Image (spheres, helix red, strand yellow):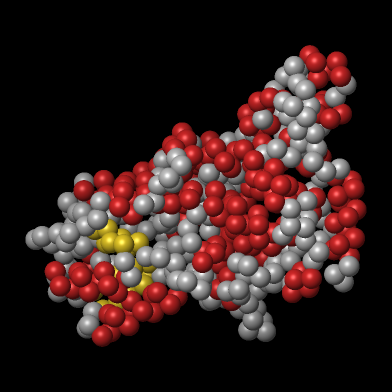
Amino acid sequence: AALETGCPVVPVYIHHPIPPHYPQLKRGAASNWWLHHSLAALTDSLQTKGLRLSLFQADPNVALQHLQAVYTIRHLITDQHFEPHQAPMLEAVAGWCRANGVSFQALNTNLLLDPTALANKQGRPYKVFTPFYRAFRPLITWPKPKPIPSQIIAPIHWPETLPLPALGLLPKINWAEGFNRYFEPGEAGALKRLDTFLNQAVAAYGHQRDIPGLDGTSQLSPHLHFGEISPQTLWAEVMNHCHLHPEEQGEPYLRQLVWREFAHHILAHFPQMPDTPMDQKFERMAWQHNPQALKAWQQGLTGYPIVDAGMRQLWHTGWLHNRVRMVVGSFLVKDLMIPWQAGADWFWQTLVDADVANNTMGWQWITGCGPDAAPYFRIFNPTLQSRKFDPDGTYIRTWVPELAALPNRYLHEPASAPAAELERAKLVLGKDYPLPMVNHAQARHQAMAAYTALK
């Protein structure tokens, strides 16, 4: 769109604070790490096209006023954002443009459709995924977005810019530096991961996506969230690949992209969702506020190997397998009876793909208080989930190495291992690895009683 104006292009990133009435949506530490490296990658990419990325840390209108003093701005083109905290900012920018005679375009590059575009037969937002999917799926076209030209018109001179470190995005305690071993932020990293997924995983995605010990998912979620690859490009590439390889089915993956759209559809219509249960009776839930239990869950020291593996993967990589997200979420809200908002906040701080809509809907789904939610009586048994989805213990042994010497028979439930097996594995429960912090059967009974009391 910027190239079609025929004007010189000045790429700008404005880092602005979250509005004070949405403090819970201040970007988390892991996301800030990703943003820093994404901006660095974008800077390098633009330089190959003769452009520079100008960085500002200010209210957007203040930054625009500064730019207006340097240039005669004729067109302002930006991404359209639909999150509740973004709408006032975009409206303020649009107002500045109107007042200064600048044409303004906010383009939807983050989603396949405007999240407010669909409504059910009663003219209301969808609250169940399957009918949303049926209405959504026929509307998606196949064409791939146009590639960016190699040469773009640059201005004669460039504005002053902040150095990237001045934005203060990197964590003060650099726990996130290890993320580099697992991810490459930026468009180039996104395209590499897409190529790997198409050539190695998409064919088996339907039945391998739930196996955390396999590299069976795309892991493109942070790239999508930060706009390094568009959902339009991803949709087109999967469709093209499956057209060339008809024996490979891409629909299970495309369906997951529509789940992402569904989450944004819900958030657009229910902006209170990040901290308020959609099912209001859950406001009366007898939650337990137990900082010690919450910390054990955060650190992967619950005594349930699949839960601990997941929480350690999250801490060390900034990402968590989707099946395991459900398992650890269920454990927090139904075994420990800790409010889902505490889990959502921890994910918000530690996930590189932290997304308001998807993070919130995921937690409300597992709690049973959100749209199309799991029924309240669906309480994941972490040991059974572990045996079913990590039967050979690959995932657990990767992230809970102190259990690596246990045979598979006892790996998923170390407390059931005979003393001889524990000795052979050189494992002392309660010292080398914690005993289960709760009895799942008892915790399930207590959760059921609390949930039933809400009726």
19 lies above or below 97 = above
The percent coordinates of residue 399 (x first, y second) are 63, 32
- Image point 64% across, 40% down: which residue? 299
- Image-based side of 162 in relation to 85, left or right: left
- Image point 82% across, 55% down: which residue? 378
Quarter of the image where the N terminus is located: bottom left
The percent coordinates of residue 368 (x first, y second) are 76, 63
Give the quadrant of residue 149.
bottom left
Nearer to me, 241 or 64: 64
Quarter of the image where the C terminus is located: bottom right
- Number of numbered discs present? 0
- Image point 69% across, 72% down: which residue? 278
The percent coordinates of residue 105 (x first, y second) are 32, 74
- Image point 62% across, 57% down: which residue? 344
- Image-based side of 189 in relation to 211, left or right: left
Nearer to me, 185 or 261: 185
Is residue 189 visible in the rendered image? The answer is yes
